[in-house]
Every structure is written in C-alpha cells, then in structure tokens.
C-alpha cells in the first residue's frame, strides 16, 4: 500500500449523519471479493437517478447533479468530510474499498462506527475524528470556498486548515505505524521474512515428517 504521511487535498462535504455502509456501497455490488471495481458505485443510490446493478455501463447512467460528488467544484477530492456515526450498519469491507478506489485517502467526521473505522485503517485509509464544533467550521468553509483544501499530517497527527489553524487528532500508535510505512498485516509479517525462513529450515531439520521431506 502507498504510505500515508502528509496529504493535502480538495475536500468534499457530505453533510449527513449516520451514513451506513449500504449507502456507501449498496449490497448488490458485494458479489466480488476483489478490492477493485467499486469506486464507480460509491454512494450509488445518491449519485445516480436510476437503479444500480453490477455490470452496468455507469458512463451512460443519469446523474443526480445535486449530489456533492457530481458537482464540478468537488471533482478530484481526496478528503471526505461527514457527520457523526459515519460507516454504521453492516461490517462490509467493500465500503473503504469503494471510497479508496474513488480517490479518498482520508475521511473526517465527528465519530465513526467501530468496525468501519478499523476497516479503513486496515486498507490504507485514515479516518480522523474531530469535535463537532470543529466539523461545523470546516463544513462552513468547504461550502463557502471553491477548491477548499485541508492538509492532514499523520506523523504530527494534525489537520491544518487553509488559515493555518491546527486541529490535533488521535490515532492508535500501531495503526499509525502501518499507515506511515504503507503496511497491512501481510506486509508487517513479510518484514520478518528472513527470520521466518530460518525458523522453517530449522523445523524441517528437526521434524522432516511434517514437511514430507523424510527419505527412506
């Protein structure tokens, strides 16, 4: 995964609370377990005016021009802001996959559903929790200023507004290490590949029958 260190990007304001994972990526798109192919159906029921289903040509579907992601000023956004309890509902990992493939690396809200929060961290996306009064200010600025950007510094654990004001946030140190180094659980294990190889070779010598290497 790509390391997350400092990200500066356009902000897309989704001014809704209790956005559940079925709204992020509807259930009919969950047949695939690949991590790709979900971005075009992110917030499908809000982005499009027709009913979505797998295999559609999304380029010819009628768009809901009032939805934030369809508005020209928010194209290319890499930071999504939302209200409390974002990512509630079912535990589908497809939700952060869809957000990431669309182009979001950061989601900022006043609170998250626990499973969604952890799924984001496991998939290289940073969920940031800020107080509701701070979110009110950021929403107002994002709506008032076209091209509004934030800078998120993971190493310093800071969100920096265009006026230079800094808002600190908390993140688990172990998960922070994952993101800063572009790691997932497999990547973390592979950091010890030399030690694993040595252990396997010793185990083969001590218990060859386990590895089917015993010669009669």
Image: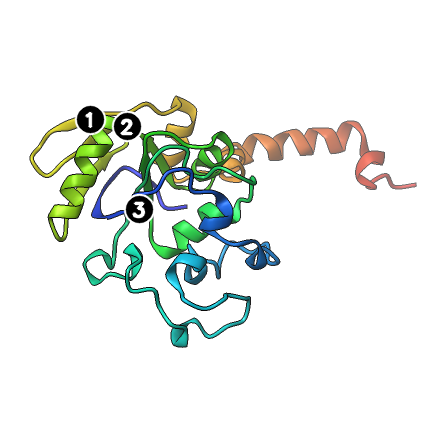
Mark 1 nearby-residue class (10 Å; few <14, some 14–19, many ≥20)? some
Q: Position of residue 97 (x, y in %)?
A: 46, 50
Q: Position of residue 114 (x, y in %)?
A: 48, 29
Mark 3 vs 2, N-terminal side: 3
Nearer mark to the viewer, of 1 and 3: 3
Q: CA distance from mark 1 to mark 3?
A: 20 Å
Q: Which residue is mark 2?
A: 130
Q: CA distance from mark 1 to mark 2?
A: 8 Å
Q: Which residue is mark 1?
A: 167
Q: Residue at x 38, y 61 (%)?
A: 47
Q: Secondary structure beneath disc 1? A: strand
Residue at the far right in the pictured view: 216
Residue at the far bottom in the pictured view: 60
Query: Please, is residue 50 above or below residue 143 in the view?
Result: below
Mark 1 vs 3, N-terminal side: 3
Tell me, yes or no, if residue 126 can be seen here.
Answer: yes
Nearer mark to the viewer, of 1 and 2: 2
Q: Position of residue 51 (x, y in %)?
A: 50, 66
Q: Residue at x 7, y 35 (%)?
A: 163
Q: Secondary structure beneath disc 3? A: loop
Instruction: Determine which quarter of the picture holds residue 120.
Output: top left
Q: Which residue is mark 3?
A: 14
Tell me, yes or no, if residue 157 can be seen here.
Answer: no
Disc 1 vs disc 2: Cβ atoms closer than 8 Å?
A: yes
Colouring scheme, one of rainbow, by chain, secondary structure, one colour: rainbow
């Amino acid at each position: 995964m790509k390391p997350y260190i400092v990200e500066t990007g356009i902000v897309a304001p989704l001014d809704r609370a209790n956005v559940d994972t079925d709204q992020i990526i509807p259930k009919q798109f969950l047949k695939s377990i690949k991590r790709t192919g979900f971005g075009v159906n992110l917030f499908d029921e809000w982005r499009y005016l027709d009913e979505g289903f797998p295999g559609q040509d999304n380029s010819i579907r009628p768009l809901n021009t009032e939805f934030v992601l369809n508005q020209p000023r928010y194209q290319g956004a890499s930071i999504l802001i939302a209200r409390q309890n974002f990512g509630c509902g079912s535990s589908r990992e497809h939700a952060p996959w869809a957000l990431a493939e669309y182009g979001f690396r950061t989601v900022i809200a006043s609170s998250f559903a626990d499973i969604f929060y952890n799924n984001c961290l496991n998939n290289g996306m940073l969920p940031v929790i800020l107080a509701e009064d701070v979110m009110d200010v950021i929403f107002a600025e994002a709506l008032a200023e076209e091209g509004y950007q934030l800078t998120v510094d993971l190493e310093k654990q800071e969100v920096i507004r265009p006026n230079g004001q800094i808002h600190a946030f908390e993140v688990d140190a172990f998960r922070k290490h994952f993101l800063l180094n572009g790691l997932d659980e497999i990547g973390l294990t592979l950091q010890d590949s030399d030690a694993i190889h040595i252990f396997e070779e010793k185990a083969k010598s001590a218990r060859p029958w386990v590895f089917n290497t015993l010669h009669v």
